[in-house]
Amino acid sequence: MGILKDVTIGQYVARDSLIHRLDPRTKLISLSVLVVAVFVADALSFHLILVVYIGIAVLLSKLPVLLVLKNIRPFLWLMVLTLGLHGLFTTEGTLIFSIAWLNVTSEGLTRGLFFSYRLAVLISSTALLMLTTSPMDLIDALEHLLRPLRKVGVPVHELAMMTGIALRFIPALVDEADRLRKAQLARGADFGGGIVRKTRNLLPLVVPLFLSSFRRADRLAVAMEARCYRGGEERTNFRELGFRRADGLALAVVFLVTLVGLLLNTLELTV
């Protein structure tokens, strides 16, 4: 459970930086565009440019690089699984070695490493967004971007509110899980052993964690009802969002990087 401490989703680290001062809509749009480009473009030159771009963004945010990168650790098992599946079940390429009826090829390992890299970029970019944007700003940005869907009956405000509440609950649940784990260890619980034993020993931890989550949700619902919360009906914002020159420049850079990536990908396919 200690590995959950590496997850910073929902945690906001206040800094006086250029990235923090950007409009949250700018950051959401930038992340969406880059994620699409990462999974569409295959050109190696583009991904080198993308890594440099993300590195510069981290430096501009004035956040420790390790704080952003440590979010990858809880998903290492997924990357290893991706690498293994591609390495064992891809038949193209040069045969490296064979295990029974499974053949490991150079093309399979290359694809596995590439898809693992894509996951790492997705995780680190999302972590950078969360660390530099407060949950309330994310709620406002999401509501503004989805506002046109209100015309077709989509409850945009309620969806944005639920997303924000979920993000705010993640750090609280991580802390609660760590507190419960320490309490169980003090009572003689053992969370070691094999996978089956670990899964069985987690039951005394999962049940109180779920009960605590339900109590938190119930208290929050009562508090919102006591304050006469009525969703998005004629509600105003304490702080209105507004694009500035820095936001326009940031979006221009993102679209330029994406365009370069698509052009490089097209040229690579043509050659």
Image: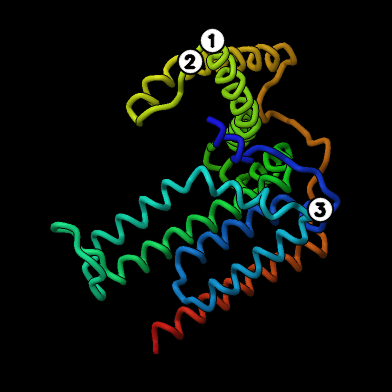
Q: Which residue is mark 3?
A: 21
- Above or below residue 121? Residue 195 is above
Q: Verify CB contact (< 8 Å) between mark 1 and mark 3.
A: no
**Where in the figure is residue 133, as x and y percent of width and height?**
72, 45
Name which residue type carries label 3.
Arg
Residue 189: which numbered mark, if any?
2
Front residue (pair 191, 211): 191
Closer to the camera: disc 3 or disc 2?
A: 2
**Extreme residue toward the bottom, this view:** 271
**Extreme residue toward the left, this view:** 101
Label 1 crowd bin: few (<14), some (14–19), many (20+), radius 10 Å: few
Q: CA distance from mark 1 to mark 3?
A: 47 Å
Q: Verify CB contact (< 8 Å) between mark 1 and mark 2.
A: yes
For image coordinates 70% across by 56% down, the residue present is 26
Q: Quadrant of residue 216?
A: top right
What is the secondary structure assignment of the residue under circle 3? helix
